[in-house]
């Protein structure tokens, strides 16, 4: 597994800050988004590992640009397939909603309304 670049770290930090702001206003939406992001990270790693497992040919050498493009492509694919109904992120979200913390949270939210 390769290390995280400064650009990736900056994007992850920005997403985390956006998630924290969303959590203050709409905690359940933030939970759903966090579950989808988690699933997206898993899919991205799976796609990268599939690419590494493929047999490579020296006929067309892989340039740095091709590596960046493929990584970006895998990231976009991972974002598109994550968070859909019936996906891992959706299952994780529904499972976390059943925990004591979120059951108590929903009761508190009902009292405030």
Image (cartoon, helix red, strand yellow):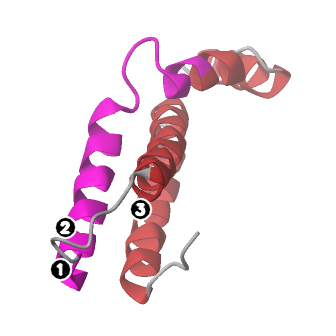
Magenta stretch: give its range.
Answer: 62-91
Q: Is residue 75 magenta?
A: yes
Residue at image x 51%, y 38%? Answer: 39
Query: Which class describes the residues within 10 Å of circle 2: few (<14), some (14-19), or many (20+)?
Result: few
Q: Which residue is mark 2?
A: 69
Q: Is residue 33 shown above or below 104?
A: below
The x, y position of residue 49, in whole percent, is 49, 53
Mark 3 / mark 1, whichever is N-terminal: 3
Q: Nearer the viewer, residue 32 or 42?
A: 42
Name the foreground residue: 16 vs 60.
Answer: 60
Q: Is residue 112 magenta?
A: no
- The mark lying in front, picked from 2 and 3, is 2
Q: Which mark is residue 65?
A: 1
Rendered image quadrant of residue 7 = bottom left
Distance (Cα) linking label 3 and label 1: 25 Å
The main secondary structure of the magenta stretch is helix
- According to the image, label 3 marks what residue? 15
| Quadrant occupied by the N terminus | bottom right
Instruction: Give the quadrant of residue 91.
Output: top right
The residue at 49%/45% (across/down) is 46
């Amino acid at each position: 597994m390769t290390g995280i670049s400064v650009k990736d770290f900056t994007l992850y930090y920005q997403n985390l800050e956006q998630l924290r702001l969303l959590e203050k206003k709409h905690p359940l939406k933030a939970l759903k988004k966090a579950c989808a992001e988690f699933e997206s990270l898993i899919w991205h790693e799976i796609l990268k590992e599939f690419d590494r497992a493929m047999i490579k040919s020296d006929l067309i050498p892989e340039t740095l640009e091709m590596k960046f493009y493929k990584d970006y492509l895998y990231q976009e694919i991972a974002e598109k397939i994550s968070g859909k109904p019936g996906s891992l992120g959706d299952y994780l979200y529904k499972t976390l909603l059943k925990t004591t913390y979120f059951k108590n949270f929903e009761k508190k939210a009902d009292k405030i309304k």
